[in-house]
Image: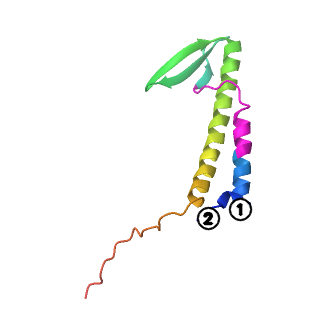
Amino acid sequence: MEKDFLKSKDGQKLQDRFLELRKELSTLDWITHGSVTPNHPGSWKWTTKVKARTVTQSLSKEQADLFKQAISENKRAQSILNEMHSISHEVLLKSAPGTRKKSTRKFIPKAS
């Protein structure tokens, strides 16, 4: 649409939010995916998927705490990235002229 979309009020708000998210992303600590569950009294297990296979690792209480934090950080990172994708999509579409949207409806003549 607009060549200078990022100079507009809406464009500037999106850019500011994107920069905030990028800064927040840089503050995250260790990240991993999976889940941590109790195994036996005093021990824990971490379970994740690797190449479509489930992998399980025994953990101490201290390791379980670290993995729980890393899993939480990963969820936050994914949330930030999802919002960054959304903002990027909007800005990219509005920053340059695009094609006209074609109708997906087919013309079907009325029967006489």
| Frontmost residue, 78 versus 40 | 78
Give the mark nearer the N terminus: 2 vs 1. 2
| Frontmost residue, 47 versus 69 | 69
Give me the residue at 62% from left, 22% from top: 36
Provide the residue span drawn in magenta.
Answer: 19-34
Tell me the number on the disc at residue 2: 2
Point out residue 86 in the picture as x, y percentages from the top left corner.
60, 50
The number of numbered badges drawn on the structure is 2
Quadrant of residue 46 within the rendered picture: top right
The residue pinned by badge 1 equals: 8
Give me the residue at 65% from left, 61% from top: 4
Q: Is residue 7 above or below residue 47?
A: below
Q: Is residue 109 magenta?
A: no
Give me the residue at 74% from left, 61% from top: 9
Point out residue 60 in the picture as x, y percentages from the top left corner.
66, 11
| Frontmost residue, 59 versus 71 | 71
Element under disc 1? loop
The quarter in which the C terminus is drawn is bottom left
Horizontal arrangement in the rendering, residue 85 relative to residue 55 (left or right): right
Q: Amino acid at mark 2?
A: Glu
Q: Are marks 2 and 1 in contact (CB under 8 Å)?
A: yes
The quarter in which the N terminus is drawn is bottom right
Colour mapping: rainbow
Q: Is residue 41 above or below residue 24?
A: above
